[in-house]
Amino acid sequence: MKNSKARIKGLMAEKAIYIVFVILLIGIIIVEPKFLSFNNFRNIFAQSATKIIIALAAGMILVVQGVDLSTGRMIGLAAVVFASLVQTPEYAYRMYPDLAKLPLIVPLLVVMLLCLIFGTVSGLAVAIFRVPPFIATLGMQLILYGISSIYFDRPPYGAQPIGGIDPTVTKIATGSIGVGEFRIPYLIIIALLVCVICWIVWNKTKFGKYMFAVGGNPEAAKVSGVNVIRTQITVYAAAGMMYAVAAALEVARISSASNTTGNGYEMDAVAACVIGGVSLSGGVGSVGGIVIGVLIFTVINYGLAFIGVNMYWQYIVKGLIIMLAVIIDMRKYTKRK
């Protein structure tokens, strides 16, 4: 009897986040029953699309006992570069007036390569020079912000948002497939595709197994023949390319870019990962959990805004949920030790 009570108590403690989420959701529905509509949930999934890709990238780094504080600034740099390469020829304030219209894949590959380089540099600092991930990526954050600001704030137009985005790009965010009201935005389809790829890589490849082995116990992984340094560098590099994809989708979604695009995204990404069950101690996490973590945050934001709750109260609720998630994670880590 005592064992069963203890088991139930432990289970409730571990699932406290989901219990709080369900209570909040029920409260939102009671206040505004119209929240339960297909359009609302479609909007929630569409708003979550880029956040899911960013969180999956951040989650990979957390799994190998790292953390990436440069996420937002890397997205900002990729966004301004991508936006500058996909402006319509007719736009009066083009950054490159003489540049011919490029196939969409070219600007995307450019920013993916750019973020791959910076991600690799962060990975080298962490894996080879043993710089703590917090410090390495904090330094990279400042470097990226400086580079993006220099690129963005150039004559003759100076620091004004890069607009005039080609309609073929914005259609990625506004377009959808389906019949009548039951349409699925392209953003959701792209996010699902990325989720499937990540799930396969995490669960069905040697690299995925190495990633979790390094995160669980780097020394044991090294003894087992895992190339720890290569795995860590590859994780940071892959995360960089995923940030670039997310940046391109953000440009399509907001139809512009500036050096502040992506600011603070790293905090939301890490928070969503922790809520989704990724351990800050490394070695634990799942694609499904991260997706759920992102959706929980988006539903809370969207739902509280839907019923007219002040934005400042939304910050308080999010902060409390993050603290609760970290406490639960630390309890699990303590038990494992």
Image (spheres, helix red, strand yellow):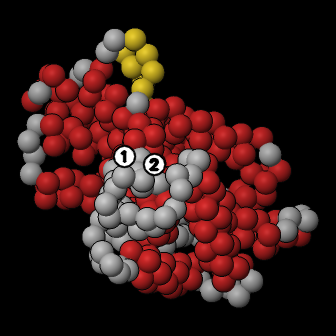
- Give the answer, above or below, for where 2 lies relative to 65: above
Q: Nearer the viewer, residue 21 or 118?
A: 118
Residue of label 1: 253
Within-10-Å neighbours for mark 2: few <14, some 14–19, many 20+: many
Q: Nearer the viewer, residue 10 or 314?
A: 314
- Residue sitting at x 21%, y 58%: 315
Look at the picture and state if 154 lies above or below 72: below
- Check disc 1 and report its element: helix, strand or loop: helix
| Location of residue 124 with respect to 263 vertically, above or below | below
Find disc 2 in the rendering and name its residue.
249
Q: Do residues under tags 1 and 2 come within 8 Å of each other at their CB atoms?
A: yes
195 sits to left or right of 152: right
Whole-percent x, y for residue 200 in the image: 71, 40
Residue type at tag 1: Arg
From the viewer's side, name the closer residue of 62 and 69: 69
Q: Is residue 191 visible?
A: yes
The C terminus is located in which quarter? bottom right
Count of all numbered marks drawn on residues in the image: 2
Residue positioned most to the top: 179
For the point 46% across and 67% down, which residue is it? 96
Residue at 43% from the left image edge and 16% from the top image edge? 178
* Residue 333 disc label: none
Q: Position of residue 290 (x, y in %)?
A: 50, 46
Task: Tell me which amino acid carries mark 2.
Answer: Leu
User: Residue 264 falls in which quadrant of the image?
Assistant: bottom left
Distance, label 1 to label 2, CA atoms, is 6 Å
Q: Secondary structure at mark 2?
A: helix
